[in-house]
Amino acid sequence: MYEILLQTQAAAPALEPSAAAALAVGLAALGAGFAERGIGAAAMGAIAEDESLFVNGLILTVLPETLVILALVVVFLV
């Protein structure tokens, strides 16, 4: 009897796949932007003090953006 009840109840997906992908990329972008806020301010302060730190500051500022790129890659692979 219990087996019949379990078979008749179909579970609906909690979230559409496209909505889940948009949520994943959006949260990754939000996290990257939050990280870039502090890193960018610190990098600009360091560059103002010593111009030879420009390349290091640029690399550290762009590094969190790879999170969004990886999220987009995962969305297209899935």
Image (cartoon, rainbow, N blue to C red):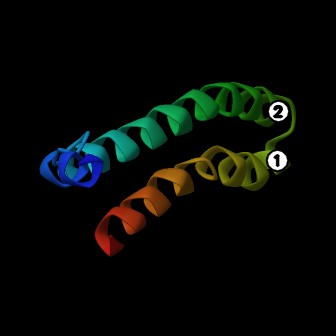
Could you say where residue 23 lies in the image, as x and y percent from the top left? 33, 39
Q: Which of the 4 image quadrants contains residue 39?
A: top right
In the picture, which quadrant includes the C terminus?
Answer: bottom left
Q: Is residue 49 left or right of residue 3?
A: right
Could you say where residue 76 lies in the image, as x and y percent from the top left? 30, 69
Residue neighbourhood size for the residue with mark 1, other residues' Cα within 10 Å, grouped as few (<14), some (14–19), many (≥20): some
Q: Is residue 38 left or right of residue 56?
A: left
**x 46%, y 52%: residue:** 68
User: Which is more N-terminal, label 1 or label 2?
Assistant: 2
Q: Dot 1 corresponds to which residue? A: 53
**x 26%, y 39%: residue:** 14
Q: Is residue 30 left or right of residue 60?
A: left
Could you say where residue 21 lies in the image, as x and y percent from the top left? 30, 51
As drawn, the label of residue 20 is none
Query: Secondary structure under badge 1?
Result: helix
| Cα–Cα gap, marks 2 and 1 | 7 Å
The vertical placement of 10 against 73, above or below, is above
The vertical placement of 33 against 9, above or below, is above
